[in-house]
Amino acid sequence: MAVTALLGLGLAPAVTAQSQQTQQPAQVPNAPKPQPTAPIIDAASGPIKPGSGAGLESSDTGSGSVPQQTVTAPPAPKQVQPPAGPPPAMPPPEQLGTILRLNVTYVEVPVTVKDAKGRLVAGLTWRDFRVFENGNYEPLKEFFVDPFPMSMVFVVDRSLRTGDMDSVNQSLGAIQGALTPYDEIQVMTYGNGTTNVSGSFTGAQSARVPYLIAMAKSSGTEALNPVNSGPFDSCGVHVNGNCVDPNLQEGRSAGNGYFMTIPKEIHTLNDAVLAAAKELSNRPRERRRIIYVISDGAEYGSKAKYNEVLRYLETNHIAVYGTLVGDAARWGEGRLSRLHMPFTMYDNLLVKYTIATGGTLDSEHGLNNIEKSYLALAEEARNKYTLVYASHEPLIDSKFRNIDVRVARPNMEVVAPRGYYPSAQDQ
């Protein structure tokens, strides 16, 4: 009845369509189709980024959409750079408006400054020093006050008198106490010839040093009154008016049947200093090269000449220090030896070596004073002002360069080498 009524009102077709639509089942979506597996991308060449996977992005919402695949473009080929042509020509300095200068030689000058009482002066700066080479002012490039390690050749004179040699023998052990573990030492002796006791350099505080010092000890020589004539001369036995000693030359220098020429004592100081300098010439430039001599300063019988030895010292930047003993250590003797009178001979060559190379010389008597001189001279040799300047002289011309160091303070004594000879080792 209800349907009939509705048909009567003209609404039945609409209701019928609505009911039919309501009764139809819902359509099921199709499953995603299988896709081909993406190729593996090399991590070294592919665009793999942190957090983005291997370059594949998919969005599966469950509605049947197909995942999208991001295709990476192949890397661009490497561009080969063509070979470069010759560099452009540099214009001359006149066009640049700049003059280029190159200082090829740096010179190190170790300097000791003392006051009027002979004490070391500390606290100076580079502004207090003036350096002149061959009369020309040279500005300082570097300035050091740090102590340097030393390479020392310790030379002992075995031709001293017996009493003086006894004091030297007892004092030799104190030289090790004046050195540091960073230093090195070599021991030599001389009399009638030079003997290398240690053979090579060894650590200054090693257990080998006392043994080497003991080997340098000697009994010395006796001071006898020379007799060259009469029954008490050195050659008391004569045959036909001639001395029968085969070690003496007949006539001339050995005398004749009535008198005998007294032979001179041999003190090969020049040969000993030269032998020590040869050992030091191979040591590193970062060390102080020191020759320390215990002697009376006498020289006779050396094959090497003083001027030749001094040139070798000044070429290799070696300083000579020494302690005078014996007759040369008399009061005022060491000071007077520095004041050389014109047209007179040098009786003490050790004084000349120390003055020319910038070293220091002490004159001491007695065991205690000799031991103190070791400590004082070793401290002075290690603690110096080091001045560095650039020389404007030619690179190597084998000519002596005079050095004059001045301090802008009154009553100061400056101890420095008088100059140097250039060498290839300086470059």
Image: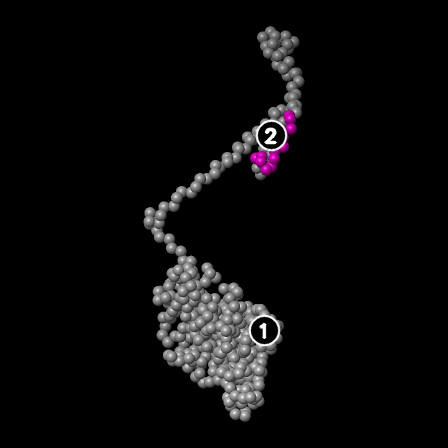
Q: Amino acid at mark 2?
A: Ser
Give the left or right position of residue 117, taking residue 272 as reference. left
Work out whether residue 340 or residue 131 is closer to the camera in this orientation and state it: 340
| Residue 107 placement (x, y as % from top left) | 43, 63
What residue is at 57 percent from the left and 72 percent from the top? 196
Kindly report the distance in space between the C-alpha atoms of the residues bearing marks 2 and 1.
Answer: 90 Å
Question: Disc 1 residue type?
Answer: Val
Which disc number belongs to residue 37? none
Magenta stretch encompasses residue 279:
no
Number of numbered discs: 2
Q: Secondary structure at mark 2?
A: loop
Dot 1, crowdedness within 10 Å: few (<14), some or many (≥20)?
some
- Quadrant of the image for the N terminus? top right
Residue found farthest to the bottom: 231
Q: Is residue 37 magenta?
A: yes
Q: Is residue 257 above or below residue 16?
A: below
Towards the viewer: 427 or 410: 427
Can see residue 102? yes
Q: Which residues are magenta?
A: 35-47
* x and y percentages locating residue 159 in the rendered image: 54, 81
**Label located before the other in sequence (2 or 1):** 2
The answer to whether 77 is drawn above or below residue 418 in the figure is above
Numbered badge on residue 58:
2
The residue sitting at 61% across, 9% down in the picture is 12
Q: Which residue is mark 1?
A: 197
Q: Identify the residue at the far top of this view.
A: 8
Q: Residue at x 54, y 76 (%)?
A: 193
Relative horizontal placement of residue 185, taking residue 127 as reference (left or right)? right
> Residue 319 at x, y = what percent?
47, 71
Q: How many residues crowd around disc 2 within 10 Å: few (fewer than 14), some, or many (20 or more)?
A: few
Residue 228 appears in the rendering: no
